[in-house]
Image: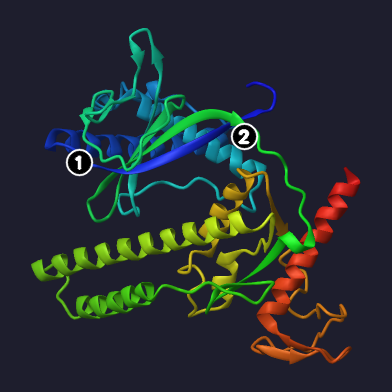
């Protein structure tokens, strides 16, 4: 990599339309990858229990006892080995964030396998042509590209997934080098703080919040009606299976709406501000505390991920703020802390200076100030 340049990755997720033969081979690959993951995980645990040493065997060790593994692409099996190795490394590096690897089941939310592109003397093992996507053993896959990659991008890997609704998708990863963006120095005027809100998705430090599309609420109401109808049907009947497929399709539709909304909001904020301060709150823990709420349904964690990488690609700052800082109980005008503030109070009066405060807006302002102060400390220490 040249000086002043950095490596980036871009992923295209596009629908796949396989032939019956290709779909059958995909199903075999899903099963082989799941079989290999579970057996490797079991052998690692047994070897560690006997020797107190972690040893991860290679896929070649299992092919003699399971000849069906030879029917699928070996690169997909190698990717399973690399994924399991990375899962262990992530867990040992930060067990509070990453879970211990678990066995995979057929009832998973989606099935997938990854194939990495390898260079050969005849050319790369995976090629994107005008006719489709050429892959080892699968042959030419018919895909629908919504945009074309630039000519200097190199294809790195392809991940094939199958959803619960029976649809196939492939995520094509491209790598390329580009000029490193110039770092942008944030100022208080060009910095915004975001506070998560169950009712309004988020409230920023200016008191603004996004307009939630009415289609999202309508889609959730439709899903509730469909689930109510499903609950009255006899499990296992043809009508039940048909209604279950409709419910799955509606779940997929809502997930696509949520992802599209998160992309739109993160792009708007990344373009409008030089720095964004967000609390690094554990949404899973928040969902357990607020039982009956839709903390995870809102997609705020996905929104934070999108916002982070979009800011980084423009040389801007994404600032994590301590989730345990008393941002909600601190008055942004005088800095006084109201320890008696009720959890459900939406507005309150500061007992120290008498300022009239709106809870969400005041919290967002404090998040911005805490983020800027933390950034200033880190810059001074460096």
In x, y percent, where is residue 128? 31, 27
Apparent side of residue 229 relative to residue 212 in the rendered image (left or right): left
Q: For the residue carrying disc 2, how many other residues have a C-alpha within 10 Å: few (<14), some (14-19), or many (20+)? A: few
Q: Name the residue under label 1.
A: 17
Classify 10 Å Cα crowding around label 1: few (below 14), some (14-19), many (20 and above): some
Which residue is outermost to the top?
Answer: 121
Gap between marks 1 and 2, in whole Å? 47 Å
Disc 1, SS? loop
Q: Which of marks 1 and 2 is nearer the N terminus?
A: 1
Q: Quadrant of residue 38?
A: top left
Q: Is residue 2 above or below residue 83?
A: above
User: Is residue 46 in view?
Assistant: no
Quadrant where the C terminus is found in the figure: top right
Q: Name the residue under label 2.
A: 52
Residue 46 locus on image (x, y percent): 50, 36
Q: Residue 209 carries which label?
A: none
Left or right of 6: which side holds 291?
Answer: left
Quadrant where the N terminus is found in the figure = top right
**Front-lying residue, 196 or 294:** 196
What SS does tag 2 mark?
loop
């Amino acid at each position: 990599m040249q000086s002043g340049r950095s490596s980036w990755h871009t992923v295209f997720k596009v629908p796949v339309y396989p032939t019956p033969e290709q779909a059958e081979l995909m199903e075999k690959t899903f099963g082989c990858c799941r079989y290999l993951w579970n057996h490797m995980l079991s052998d690692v645990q047994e070897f560690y229990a006997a020797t107190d040493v972690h040893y991860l065997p290679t896929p070649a060790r299992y092919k003699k006892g399971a000849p069906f593994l030879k029917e699928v692409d070996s690169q997909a099996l190698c990717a399973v080995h690399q994924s399991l190795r990375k899962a262990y490394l992530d867990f040992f590096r930060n067990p509070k964030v990453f879970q211990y690897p678990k066995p995979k089941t057929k009832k998973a939310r989606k099935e997938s396998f990854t194939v990495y592109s390898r260079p050969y003397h005849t050319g790369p093992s995976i090629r994107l042509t005008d006719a489709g996507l050429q892959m080892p053993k699968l042959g030419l896959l018919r895909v629908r590209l919504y945009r074309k990659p630039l000519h200097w991008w190199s294809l790195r890997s392809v991940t094939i997934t199958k959803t619960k609704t029976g649809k196939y998708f492939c995520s094509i990863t491209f790598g390329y080098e580009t000029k490193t963006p110039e770092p942008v120095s944030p100022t208080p005027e060009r910095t915004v703080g975001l506070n998560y809100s169950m009712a309004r998705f988020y409230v920023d430090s200016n008191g603004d919040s996004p307009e939630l599309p009415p289609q999202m609420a309508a889609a959730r109401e439709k899903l509730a009606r469909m689930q109510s109808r499903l609950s009255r049907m006899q499990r296992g009947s043809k009508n039940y299976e048909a209604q279950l497929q409709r419910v799955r399709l509606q779940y997929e539709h809502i997930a696509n709406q949520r992802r599209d909304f998160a992309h739109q909001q993160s792009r708007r904020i990344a373009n409008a501000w030089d720095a964004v301060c967000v609390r690094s709150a554990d949404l899973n823990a928040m969902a357990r505390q607020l039982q009956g709420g839709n903390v995870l349904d809102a997609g705020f964690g996905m929104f934070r991920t999108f916002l982070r990488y979009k800011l980084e690609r423009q040389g801007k700052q994404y600032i994590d703020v301590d989730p345990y800082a008393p941002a909600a109980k601190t008055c942004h005008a005088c800095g006084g802390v109201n320890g008696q503030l009720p959890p459900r109070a939406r507005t309150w009066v500061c007992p120290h200076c008498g300022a009239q405060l709106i809870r969400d807006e005041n919290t967002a302002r404090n998040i911005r100030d805490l983020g800027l102060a933390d950034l200033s400390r880190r810059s001074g220490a460096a």
